[in-house]
Amino acid sequence: MIFLFGSTRFVILCGPFAIKIARFRPIRAIIRLWQLLKTREVKRELQKYHKQPVLGGFAYLMAGVIANRTEYRRYIKYNHCQLVPTEFSFLGLLNVQRRGKQLTMHDRSALRAQALWQLSNGRTDDLRSARQFCSIGGRVCLADYASDIEDLLKRALCNDAGTDLDPHKLK
């Protein structure tokens, strides 16, 4: 069993599964709010999470739950695409996904052919990090897809008819 800590979720790697548990961050939120009050940037910062600051504060506190729900919904919508399967979700508090294998150096060269990787060129977020991808059944799949990538999912993974694009197979 391996335990990992992200900014919004705990991840437990156990056998063939990755279990993502939402983190609640009330103390971190209070500290961050105090810092923003000093600089008078509360409204601007909260609007990064939602256009209404009160809802932005709620979204900040519930970021782990929102991330889990987002991944679950995206997998349901794009389940024929190159995403790590979300096998089970419980109210956004807990996601169970199939566990992929870490990419080897050989696999990382194949990553360049993965549609999401190609379209993310120029982005500076986590999507450009090879650690966000893994290998499942000889395919390079995106493991963490809770970030704002809906447009990329539509363009990269599914054509207008909603059918599969040929997945890039690893050798």
Image (cartoon, rainbow, N blue to C red):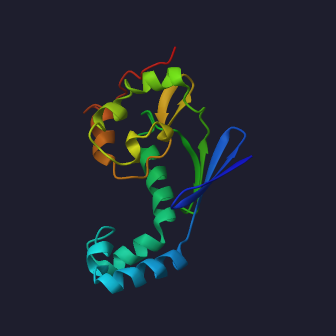
Res 157 visible:
no
Q: Position of residue 62 (x, y in %)?
A: 48, 70
Vertical order, 125 against 40 (above or below) = above
Q: Across the whole image, how many numbered discs are drawn on residues?
A: 0
Out of 35 and 13, give the one closest to the viewer. 35
Q: Position of residue 93 (x, y in %)?
A: 58, 63
Q: Residue at x 72, y 40 (%)?
A: 15
Vertical order, 51 against 162 (above or below) = below
Q: Quadrant of residue 81?
A: top left
Res 107 visible:
yes
Vertical order, 171 against 57 (above or below) = above
Q: Position of residue 85 (x, y in %)?
A: 53, 40
Q: Residue at x 51, y 63 (%)?
A: 64
Q: Is residue 72 rendered to the left or right of residue 45?
A: right
Q: Is residue 62 rendered to the left or right of residue 23?
A: left
Out of 79 and 118, give the one closest to the viewer. 118
